Image (cartoon, helix red, strand yellow):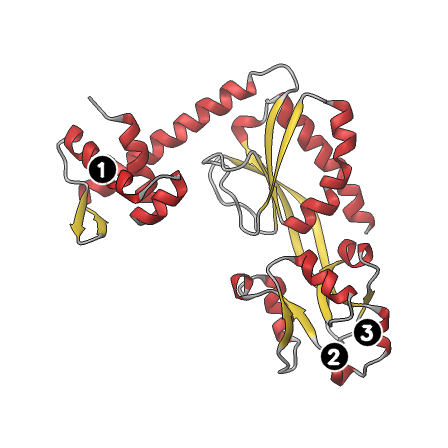
Amino acid sequence: MLDWDSLRFFSAFAREGSLAAAARALRVEHATVARRIAALEASLGLKLVDRRGRVYQLTEDGVRVSEYAAQMESASFALKRFVDGEENRIEGEVILAAPPAYLGTLVARRLGVLRERYPRLQLRLVGAKSTASLARKETDIAITFNRPQEQSVVTKSLGILRFFPYASEDYIGRRQSAEYEFIGYDRSMEDSPQQQWLLEHLQGRPLCVTSNDLRIQALAAAGNAGIVLLPDFLGKEYGLVRVDLQAAPLDLPVWLAFHEDLRSSPKIRVVLDFLLEGLAQVQEL
């Protein structure tokens, strides 16, 4: 008989690319993943991986089995979403993933309204700097700057988020433009559009402060540490002023996404409506 549980471990290995990465994703020891793969090979009578020391590589059979496993995993998540979607009461958990600053200012601060309407609804807010998988149910709803490309995902544009260079009024008042210093992301976010825009306008000057958290960057700017690239709503929140660098602002599209299987779920619908209500705030700012 097919070892369903071991198939789940093998699917994680095939998706993540290594025993260690699969173990982290499943929150188990890497030896457990290896043991489960061996158990699956025994139950199927197939060699799924080539073992070269500690390095595992998929065989041709392993690639085919991983494709079937991915389909079965997707079907299991679809079944779970279907069951959740049949829930008629507005209760239970909804997972929302979004960039941390967006999530904090434009979602978390308004949650009292949602809680008053639906006291049995529970929201898990995940500050995600990369796109969480909707198909694998890492999140129920995602707000992201990159349009999700997963199959069976419904996307809706929330408009454009405009970024400007900001600093404290005191900082700008005491310096000439040639003396400006800059605050940006660390290397973990060096490929982000915001960091790339900033690096293009440094005029050869290094970043004086770096952080992977945009709110920390904003706080550093409020503390007179330098100039930071922020969305308008965050610059205003920290009492900062725009700095004219003789450059066009950075415009990033904002997308709202959820899996199509959740379209009929009452708890998902009320959260979507709540998020769309908050869109007016973004447009005003």
Q: Earlier in the sequence, mark 1 or mark 3?
A: 1
Residue 77: x and y in percent read: 44, 28
Structural distance between the alpha carbons of marks 1 and 2: 57 Å
**Image coordinates for residue 158, horizontal then vertical, percent:** 69, 44
Q: Is residue 226 left or right of residue 30?
A: right
Residue that mark 1 sits on: 35
Q: Quadrant of residue 208?
A: bottom right
Three-letter amino acid code of the residue under disc 1: Arg
Q: Amino acid at mark 3?
A: Tyr
Q: Which residue is mark 3?
A: 171
Q: Residue at x 53, y 66 (%)?
A: 187
Question: Do the residues under discs 2 and 3 have CB atoms within 8 angstroms?
Answer: no
Q: CB of mark 1 within 8 Å of CB of mark 2?
A: no
Residue at image position (67%, 30%) is 271
Question: Can residue 113 be seen in this snapshot?
Answer: yes
Q: Is residue 163 above or below residue 257?
A: below
Q: Which residue in the protein does label 2 denote?
A: 180
Mark 2 to mark 3: distance in Å? 9 Å
The secondary element bearing badge 1 is classed as helix
Mark 1 closeness class: few <14, some 14–19, many ≥20 residues within 10 Å? some
